[in-house]
Amino acid sequence: MKKIFFAAAFFVSGSLFFSETVDEILKVYCDLDRVPDYNYSSIAVDNISKNGTVEHMDLEQFGGGANGLKNTVFSFKSPSSVKDTRILQAEKISKEDDQWVFMPALRTTRRIAPGDKGKPFVGTELTYNDLSLRKEHDDKNEIISQSESVTVNGATYDCWKMKSVPVKKNTVEYGYRISWFDKKSYIPVRIEFYDKKNASKLIKTYEVEKLEQVKGATGMTYWLRRQNLVTNIETGRKSRVTVKEYVFDKKISDGYFTQNWLTTGKAR
């Protein structure tokens, strides 16, 4: 089952086990990314150009669901060029997640077509595909190193290094991924994305710049990916995503996960 990538689960996971096979690692990672059931995050995004110019964006994210399924919504607060842009993602059991975006300038809502999911997410270096983690069977996965050290933003992690090749290559914008899974948290602290046509060409990286343990409203402990950096190797552009505030395990109204909220911004 898919898990939300850019939303709270992009930042949150639990840690309870220690495994060494591909299936065990992915099962623990995906199972732990199911929690918390409800989450709220205030998020800052800095889009950084090759010459260092920064465009700042602020948004809120709400997540919740039932029966093992997750719904996630995003509401952009600034700058004015994206203010009131809202995105709704509904997880499906055996289908691709449904994604809709409300564009305030046009006062219209449109569904994100499968062919558009490789496009940039509201001007960032993330794509709509990045909003969701892959299902385990969507990729052919193999561990290429049982113990490899990687340093990200001054922190060094002992990791499993894994290669993931999409089964359906036309559904994603890259040829394969190389991921470094931290053995303590089961979080992929670094991911490299490679070109479809040139297998040796690195096109994008994702790194966890700050990882910490936090507690939800019920006292349960989670791993929080507090700060993350996505780098477009081809253009030199970067997007730094930072969780400013968060509330986990506090029930959120189902009204947020509706078409009404998408068009009005009001959870009734």
Image: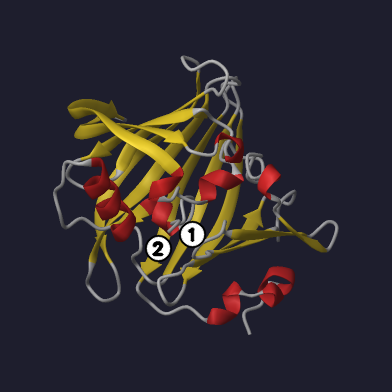
Where residue 87 sits: x, y (%)? 64, 60
Q: Quadrant of residue 150?
A: top left
Instruction: Name the image quarter holding the N terminus.
Output: bottom left
* Front one among 162 and 259: 162
Residue occupying the far bottom of the picture: 268
Expressed as whole percent of the image width and height from the top left, the position of residue 141 reads: 34, 36
Q: CA distance from mark 2 to mark 1?
A: 6 Å
Which amino acid is tagged 2?
Tyr
| Residue type marked 1 | Ser
Q: Which residue is located at x 38 percent, y 52 percent?
A: 11
Residue denoted by label 1? 42
Of helix, strand and loop, which one carries label 1? strand
The answer to whether residue 252 shows anywhere in this view is: yes
Asked whether the beta carbons under mark 2 and mark 1 sit within 8 Å of each other, the answer is: yes
Q: Which residue is mark 2?
A: 246
Q: Quadrant of residue 154?
A: top left
Work out whether residue 204 or residue 178 is closer to the camera in this orientation and state it. Answer: 178
Asked whether the viewer can see residue 186, the reply is no
Q: Residue at x 53, y 65 (%)?
A: 92
| Mark 2 element type | strand
* 3 sits left or right of 20 in the view: right
Q: Is residue 65 above or below residue 105?
A: below
The image position of residue 174, as x and y in percent, is 54, 30
Q: Residue furthest right?
A: 106
- Horizontal and vertical percent for residue 198? 54, 15
